[in-house]
Image (cartoon, rainbow, N blue to C red):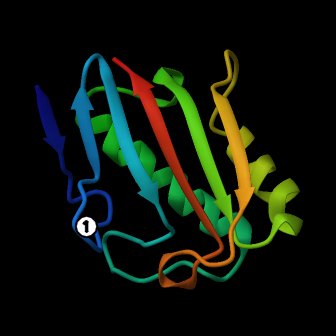
């Protein structure tokens, strides 16, 4: 059995997918890009601000289920340019204090809406 998770505090999906799906003791959060949910605008002024917006979008989805970053067990980071890794990693590190999740970071040729970073997470309930 699965439950679809949706909040107006995170960007609406831009395709046929859900913001998150709760199933089997886990929450699977779809890849988030740096869209400000209040304005619908892309945040593209710096990779740091993009990453903060992505993390804010993830946080909003987690909060719907009463969860936070401590519940995340796996993250996937997709970068348009691996040269941004250190900056993204520094911002990402602000959201985790201990018991860090498993993670991979990969460079991709293109992301939705031509953003520079997308992050998805798997959360244990």
Displayed quadrant of residue 9:
bottom left
Displayed quadrant of residue 78:
bottom right
When the figure is inspected, residue 23 is found, relative to residue 41, above or below; the finding is: above
- Asked if residue 78 lies left or right of residue 70, the reply is right
When the figure is inspected, residue 6 is found, relative to residue 96, above or below; the finding is: below
Q: Quadrant of the C terminus?
A: top left
Q: Which residue is mark 1?
A: 12
Q: Label 1's element?
A: loop
When the figure is inspected, residue 49 is found, relative to residue 114, above or below; the finding is: above
Q: Nearer the viewer, residue 52 or 5?
A: 5
| Residue drawn at 36 percent across, 26 percent down | 67
Image coordinates of residue 27 in percent, x first then y, are: 33, 31
Q: Nearer the viewer, residue 108 or 53?
A: 108
Q: How many marks?
A: 1
- Asked if residue 111 lies left or right of residue 56, the reply is right
Q: Residues within 10 Å of mark 1 (few under 14, many from 20)?
A: some
| Residue drawn at 69 percent across, 24 percent down | 97
| Residue drawn at 21 percent across, 59 percent down | 8
| Residue drawn at 61 percent across, 81 percent down | 44
Image coordinates of residue 43 in percent, x first then y, are: 54, 78
When the figure is inspected, residue 27 is found, relative to residue 90, above or below; the finding is: above
Q: Quadrant of the N terminus?
A: top left
- Asked if residue 41 lies left or right of residue 93, the reply is left
């Amino acid at each position: 059995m699965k439950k679809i998770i949706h909040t107006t505090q995170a960007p609406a999906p831009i395709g046929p997918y859900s913001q998150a799906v709760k199933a089997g003791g886990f929450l699977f959060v779809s890849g988030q890009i740096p869209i400000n949910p209040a304005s619908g605008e892309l945040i593209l002024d710096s990779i740091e601000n993009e990453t903060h917006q992505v993390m804010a979008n993830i946080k909003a989805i987690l909060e719907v289920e009463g969860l936070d970053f401590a519940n995340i067990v796996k993250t996937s980071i997709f970068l348009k340019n691996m040269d941004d890794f250190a900056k993204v990693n520094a911002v990402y590190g602000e959201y985790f204090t201990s018991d860090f999740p498993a993670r991979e970071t990969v460079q991709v040729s293109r992301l939705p809406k031509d953003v520079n970073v997308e992050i998805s997470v798997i959360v244990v309930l």
